[in-house]
Amino acid sequence: MNILLFIKDFELGSKVSSSCVDFGYNVEFCDEKTSPDDFVEKSILAIIDLDESVFFSVGLVSELKRHGLKIIASMEELKARDLKKIKAAGCDLVLPKSSLVKNLPKLINELIV
């Protein structure tokens, strides 16, 4: 099973990827050109860095949700208006970045297992 990472920040991507691999999942890094149709069949979870403007997209979240993926998003600073839009699009969980890496094993366990 794959976990899709929509993360450009190298340090954050490394930490999240390492945690996912430790949990026994394959990781696939995605960029703004990646089409969900290319990989979604083997994937169960998407983790999105909403601080990257190319990934802060209601369309991306909706498309991933339409394919049945669980979605965790993170932002440096959570803003109520942004939170409402992303949650309405289908995001299962939005967290501060500091909380994402620290709690990822628990979150994966709760959302997937």
Image (cartoon, rainbow, N blue to C red):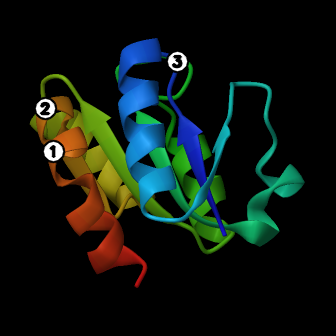
Question: What residue is at 69 percent from the left and 69 percent from the top?
Answer: 67
Secondary structure beneath label 3: loop
Question: For the residue marked with disc 2, what is the amino acid?
Answer: Ser
User: Where is residue 23 shown, x and y percent of the image?
Assistant: 43, 63
The residue to which callout 3 is attached is 8
Under circle 1, the secondary element is helix
The circle drawn on residue 98 is: 2
Amino acid type of disc 1? Lys
CA gap, disc 1 and disc 3: 19 Å
Name the mark nearer the viewer: 1 or 3: 1
Which amino acid is tagged 3? Lys
Q: Considering only vertical position in the picture, is 65 above or below 60?
A: below
Which quarter of the picture shows residue 29? top right
Question: On screen, 111 above or below 64?
Answer: below
Nearer-the-camera pick, 59 or 91: 91
Q: Which residue is mark 1?
A: 102
Of 71 and 19, the residue lying toward us = 19
Distance CA(mark 2)–CA(mark 3): 16 Å
Which is nearer the eye, 112 or 70? 112
Q: Residues within 10 Å of mark 2 (few under 14, many from 20)?
A: few
**Image point (18%, 23%), residue name:** 76
Contact (CB < 8 A) between labels 1 and 2? yes
Spot occupied by residue 31 in the image (x, y as percentages of width and height): 69, 26
